[in-house]
Amino acid sequence: KRYDGIYATHLRDEGNGLMNSLEEAVDICKRAQIPLHVSHLKWASKRDWGKMPEALAYLDSERPNLPALTHDVYPYTSSSSSIDLLLPPDFRGMLGQVHKILGDPAKRSRLVQGMLEQLRSEGFSDYRFARIAWFREEQFRGKEIPDLDLPDSWRNQTAWVINIAKDPALTRDVQNVLYVFSHGGAQMIYAVMDESDMMASLNDPYACVGSDTRVWTQDMTTSHPRSIGNFPKIIGELVRGGGISLDAALRKMTLEPATIFGLADRGRLQEGMPADLVVFDPDTVSGPADYNRLEDPRGIDYVLVNGTVVAKYGRAQEKFPGKVLRKRNESPLNFVETPLPVAESPDPKAGSPPPKNREGVSEGKKHVKPVHPAHKAPKHRTH
């Protein structure tokens, strides 16, 4: 509060403990009287799919008690995190002790029992929803947990699992998880969300768009596609598919996050502001990257950072005009209380290669991100 800051939280539990975790985060911010921002709001529990309106209603009920309460969303139904999420909470962060745990009959029994209880409590019957994005043994990258072909020596070493899991297929799944856990851990992709929940969260008037990832190159073929396709997917699929209007999507990708995090000179087109721009064709832009292959976005003509072209027709330029952005004090964003009208779904046009020698950015049907000019800039305070 002293620094006019914000509490941006990765919730303690995004599965069937989501509501308790939201209550915990709200309570922290009520006591401190600081804004709360929930990172990648999701309900990652199959048993609770379809309940996102309940979470949003709770946040609405608490909004008058906080200076601000917002959240962000990415447009995918799979998340990405470490192998730890397949373990019960009291065994997470313990890679350094894994061999000691597996060598202790009491501890390993408690570990597996906790894994199975968590699996069932979230409505899953096996580990088919869990896919390896990165693991030091390359032959397993891109594979789902049930599909790992492990050596017989490991099966024999962990034969005790059948006494707990009972089911042979589930026993193999657990053995596979334990193998990854005991061999350095892994970055995983989890297909644990429901499309309707994601759309409800995205269309909430207090939501913005976040990618929640680092930048990956195409060499990381099994990474989560949000690292390269997050924003194009929203326009290419959700806007053109009628799930959200273009105006609302642009606002959620630009002005809203900039204002939430106090970036007073970003997020809108205005004379004198830094020219951080993306020039794209709303009829052809798309994010074709998926969980099997990272592919560059399509339909983006230019990317400018601080007025300098850094990408042109899909090719990055060797220019680095970016700088660290610092928070500026700013009045709270005037959110749209009623959702903007859902866009009609036009027939998307097929993409076409860029014309030669086209240097201007004003030809054709182009849109410039970061923000639709119809939105007024918020008022600023001076200190």
Image (tube, helix red, strand yellow):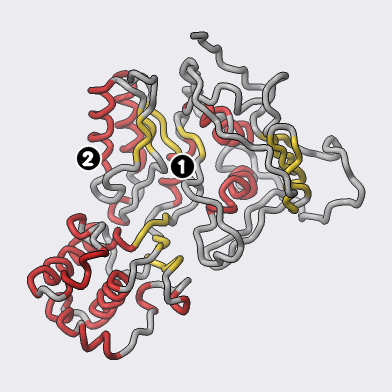
Name the quadrant of the N terminus. top left
Q: Secondary structure at mark 1?
A: strand
Q: Secondary structure at mark 2?
A: helix
Looking at the image, residue 226 lies above or below residue 130: above
Q: From this viewpoint, which residue is outermost toward the bottom?
A: 152
Q: From this viewpoint, which residue is outermost toward the top?
A: 382
The number of numbered discs placed on residues in the rendered structure image is 2
* Left or right: 309 as drawn, with respect to 153: right
Q: Quadrant of residue 294?
A: bottom right
In this rendered view, identify the residue nearer to me: 35 or 317. 317
Q: Quadrant of residue 235?
A: top right
In this rendered view, identify the residue nearer to me: 361 or 201. 361
The residue that appears at 31% across and 42% down in the rendered structure is: 11
The residue that appears at 45% across and 38% down in the rendered structure is: 72
The residue that appears at 45% across and 66% down in the rendered structure is: 133
Image coordinates of residue 64 in percent, x first then y, are 32, 18
Please name the residue that numbered disc 1 is placed on. Answer: 73
Image coordinates of residue 353 in percent, x first then y, are 83, 56
* Left or right: 70 as drawn, with respect to 233: left
The amino acid beneath tag 1 is Val
| Badge number at residue 20 | 2
